[in-house]
Image (tube, rainbow, N blue to C red):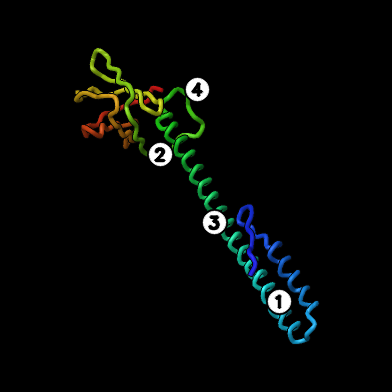
């Protein structure tokens, strides 16, 4: 049986194999003996059918592969869009406390935000202002003494039950009221 060649994205191209089988089929016409000629035609017809069947199988495989590739791309696109929305929600978290000029038009429906402290600033009273890895700046709004806060500490900010926001230092398990400054 002749080889079936594959090219491109798994698309089958059986032309060389089919052409070879067709030439062999035509050559059967030159056989002088009737029964030998008929046997030759039968043999070559089986070869042509096999090449055609393989080509159909290759097309089906290529179609299935394309469907899987398209589905994977669609999943990837949906995941990228979900990540973009989540990133936008995280960026807008707490923005309702910013002056109207700075507010984002689409305020977040996010109920909490986890972030990493990249800078700790304290005033003379010991109250802190934190710069987070997402660029947000949050200030302490209640007087509370806390153990040392360090860069790299992870915080979780949640919306308060009535208003405002509460920041929990996950390492310490301590929570204080905060306000978003930027």
Circle 4 packing at 10 Å, graded few (<14), some (14-19), many (20+), is few
Disc 2 on helix, strand or loop? loop
**Among the two numbered marks 4 and 1 on one chain, the one whose residue lies closer to the N terminus:** 1
Compared with 148, 23 (above or below) is below
CB-based contact (under 8 Å), mark 2 and mark 3: no
Q: CA distance from mark 2 to mark 3?
A: 33 Å
Q: Residue at x 59, y 56 (%)?
A: 66
Q: Nearer the viewer, mark 4 or mark 1?
A: 1
CA gap between label 2 and label 1 equals: 68 Å
Q: Which mark is residue 45?
A: 1
Q: Is residue 44 above or below residue 68?
A: below
User: Which residue is under mark 2?
Assistant: 110
Query: Which is nearer the N-term, disc 2 or disc 1?
Result: 1
**Disc nearest the viewer among 2 and 4:** 2
Query: Residue at position x 23%, y 15% from top?
Result: 125
Question: x, y percentage for residue 37?
Answer: 76, 82
Q: Residue at x 28, y 29 (%)?
A: 153
Residue with the mark numbered 3: 68
| Front of the two marks 2 and 1 | 1
Neighbour tally class for label 1: few under 14, some 14-19, many 20 plus, Cα within 10 Å: some
Answer with left or right where residue 172 lies relative to residue 5: left
Label disc, if present, on residue 101 of the rendered structure:
4
Whether label 4 touches label 1, CB < 8 Å: no
């Amino acid at each position: 049986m002749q080889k079936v060649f594959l090219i491109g994205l798994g698309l089958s191209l059986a032309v060389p194999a089919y052409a070879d089988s067709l030439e062999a089929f035509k050559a059967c016409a030159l056989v002088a003996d009737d029964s030998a000629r008929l046997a030759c035609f039968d043999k070559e017809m089986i070869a042509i059918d096999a090449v055609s069947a393989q080509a159909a199988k290759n097309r089906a495989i290529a179609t299935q592969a394309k469907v899987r590739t398209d589905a994977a791309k669609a999943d990837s696109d949906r995941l990228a869009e979900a990540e973009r929305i989540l990133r936008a929600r995280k960026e807008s978290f707490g923005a309702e406390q910013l002056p109207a000029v700075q507010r984002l038009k689409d305020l977040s429906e996010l109920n909490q935000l986890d972030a990493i402290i990249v800078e700790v600033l304290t005033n003379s009273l010991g109250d802190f202002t934190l710069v987070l890895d997402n660029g947000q700046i949050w200030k302490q709004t209640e007087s509370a003494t806390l153990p040392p806060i360090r860069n790299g500490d992870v915080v979780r900010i949640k919306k308060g039950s009535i208003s405002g926001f509460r920041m929990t230092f996950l390492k310490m398990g301590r929570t204080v009221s905060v306000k978003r400054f930027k």
